[in-house]
Amino acid sequence: MTSKTTVIHSDPEILGGTPVFVGTRVPAQTLFDYLEGGETLDEFLHQFPSVKREQALAALEIARDSLLADARPA
């Protein structure tokens, strides 16, 4: 599992503490907004080239793991 701190961080000096991809000023929320709006991961990466594919995939993995950690078996 990828550590959240190697993918996303929050700093009061960067966008007022909004969680962003490490090394960028791209809010993590933007990835989810793109996907929710029907855009592809490739389209997101094209629009935000400072975000590496590995970072975006890791963010999705972290989100998935977070959801599944609270899930109960049927």
Image (tube, helix red, strand yellow):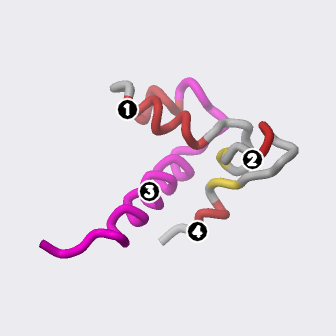
Q: Residue at x 52, y 45 (%)?
A: 53
Q: Is residue 18 left or right of residue 1?
A: right
Q: Which residue is mark 1?
A: 36
Three-letter code for the amino acid on which mark 4 is drawn: Ser
Q: If you read the primary sequence from the N terminus, does the residue marked by circle 3 or circle 4 appear first?
A: 4
Tell me how far mark 1 sits from mark 3, CA to CA: 14 Å
Q: Which residue is mark 2?
A: 23
Q: If you read the primary sequence from the N terminus, does the residue marked by circle 1 or circle 3 appear first?
A: 1
Q: Is residue 17 left or right of residue 42?
A: right
Tell me how far mark 1 sits from mark 4, CA to CA: 24 Å
**Magenta stretch in the rendered image:** 46-74
Q: If you read the primary sequence from the N terminus, does the residue marked by circle 2 or circle 1 appear first?
A: 2
Q: Secondary structure at mark 2?
A: loop
Q: Is residue 3 left or right of residue 10?
A: left
For disc 3, the neighbor class at 10 Å (few under 14, some 14 to 19, many from 20) is some
Q: Residue at x 44, y 52 (%)?
A: 60
Which percent across, then down, holds residue 1?
A: 47, 72
Which percent across, then down, holds residue 55?
A: 56, 51
Q: Is residue 36 left or right of residue 32?
A: left
Closest to the camera, between mark 3 and mark 4, is: 3
Q: Which mark is residue 3?
A: 4
Tell me how far mark 2 sits from mark 1, CA to CA: 24 Å
For disc 4, the neighbor class at 10 Å (few under 14, some 14 to 19, many from 20) is few
Three-letter code for the amino acid on which mark 2 is drawn: Gly
Q: Which residue is mark 3?
A: 63
Q: If you read the primary sequence from the N terminus, does the residue marked by circle 2 or circle 4 appear first?
A: 4
Tell me how far mark 3 sits from mark 4, CA to CA: 11 Å
